[in-house]
Image (spheres, rainbow, N blue to C red):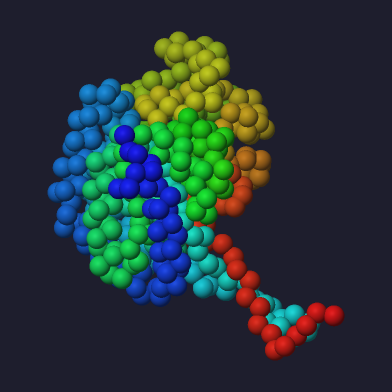
Amino acid sequence: MVDLDSDEWNLKAVAQQAQRSAVLLGQLKAGVKNQALRAMAKALRSDQSEVLEANTIDLETGRQDGLSDALLDRLKLTPQRIEAMAVALEQIAALKDPIGEVAAGWKHPDGMEIRRVRVPLGVIGIIYEARPNVTCDAIGLCLKSGNGVLLKGGREAENSNQAITRILQEAAYSSGIPQGCIQQLPGTDRAIVDALIRLDQLALLIPRGGSGLIDYVVRNATVPVLETGVGNCHIYIERSADVEMARRIVLNAKVQRPSVCNAAEKLLIHRDAVLTHLELVLTSLRDQGVEIRGCPRTIAFDPRVKPALEEDWGKEYLDKIIAVKIVDSTREAIDWINHYGSRHSEAIVTDNYHEAVQFTDGVDAAAVYVNASTRFTDGGEFGFGAEIGISTQKLHARGPVGLSELTTIKYIVTGSGQTRS
């Protein structure tokens, strides 16, 4: 257990140091930050054995604790995944620096120049579960956007997170990044989370994980929270959909990596597409080991389908499970998604332009797809280099949270002695 007020480790002191360092970080030139990011990528590659050893310990502990296969997949690091983390840092370095960007400018009638300029938020707190790659993405994005960061990873990835943070801290600080602006909070005590969500020094708090963690933070935090929601994502097969396209999209969205938030959890299908589309889709899913649950009409079509309970329709499985619902119209599909969905990512497969427009206009979600897999909702795929999470709220950011979403606005007004009458 970590003593939050001990002389050796004091959360408020750590936050105050991060706050002071963030002021300096926010004034650094883009070249210094980019050099640091490239050095961090290089260090991650050269020291990957340290990360893999730490991750092996976490995986062994997770298996002993009975973690599900889906959580173990989120937790697992491989040389390929570490390389992807390093590449993400390099991609962030290659992106335009948002700090100092003039978002708009105009002249006051009295002659003053008014500019709306992007500036860092300050210190960002991030609470997350199981996925150690988030450590790297969060540090890289916060550094480039000029923000200090206090990280609190889940106990499942404690050793992995600490190893990644140590490597990135050393590379960043040796490249001119102010000491103290990158912090991984130690230990697995819930008291650290309770203290972090009430920390005055934070400009923003971002929880990333299951619904339990997110709901707890949203309900109890006394600092601003950017909610990254769970992913109860749907694929809707409209009656005009190409059969093979529908099969490929559903299979990719469900099976390519079922443990992530942009994987499809529900399949809706128009009643007129059942006879032509559904058997092929269900067979492909079963061939990949997917358990299928469904509404009574789906069970009538295929008695092998397990009955879906009411709780299934709003659930994020993060596993090889999908629930199927037959609907009578696109309007019904939209209403169903808006009722049960999590406002994350939703998709329609259709060859009808008007049905596609009705769907994209009507569905309330951060990302809405036409004839593509929901698996593309990702900062890297959207060209952001990386992301801290997928925001499902509407203030102040929505969708993948990248560099610009980690900034705020400052108005700079330049005059020549004007006074207001």
Q: Is residue 95 above or below residue 75?
A: below
Q: Residue furthest bottom?
A: 416
Tell me what residue is drawn at x 23 percent, y 55 percent. 167
Tell me what residue is drawn at x 50 percent, y 53 percent. 201
Q: Quadrant of residue 337?
A: top right
Image location of residue 231, percent across then percent down: 48, 36
Which of the two residues, 348 or 94, is positioned nearer the viewer here? 94
Image location of residue 257, percent across then percent down: 35, 37
Q: Is residue 162 left or right of residue 214?
A: left
Q: Is residue 234 above or below residue 321?
A: below
Tell me what residue is drawn at x 40 percent, y 64 percent. 21
Picture quarter with the N terminus = top left
Q: Is residue 270 left or right of residue 257?
A: right
Image location of residue 151, percent across then percent down: 38, 48
Q: Is residue 5 left or right of residue 296?
A: left
Q: Is residue 214 left or right of residue 46?
A: right
Q: Quadrant of residue 413?
A: bottom right
Picture quarter with the C terminus = bottom right
Q: Is residue 26 above or below residue 387?
A: below
Tell me what residue is drawn at x 28 percent, y 39 percent. 158
Which of the two residues, 59 or 380, is positioned nearer the viewer here? 59
Q: In the rendered picture of this protein, how many numbered marks are placed on residues?
A: 0
Which of the two residues, 129 or 392, is positioned nearer the viewer here? 129
Q: Residue furthest right?
A: 421
Image location of residue 128, percent across then percent down: 40, 41
Is residue 7 something that shows in the picture?
Answer: yes
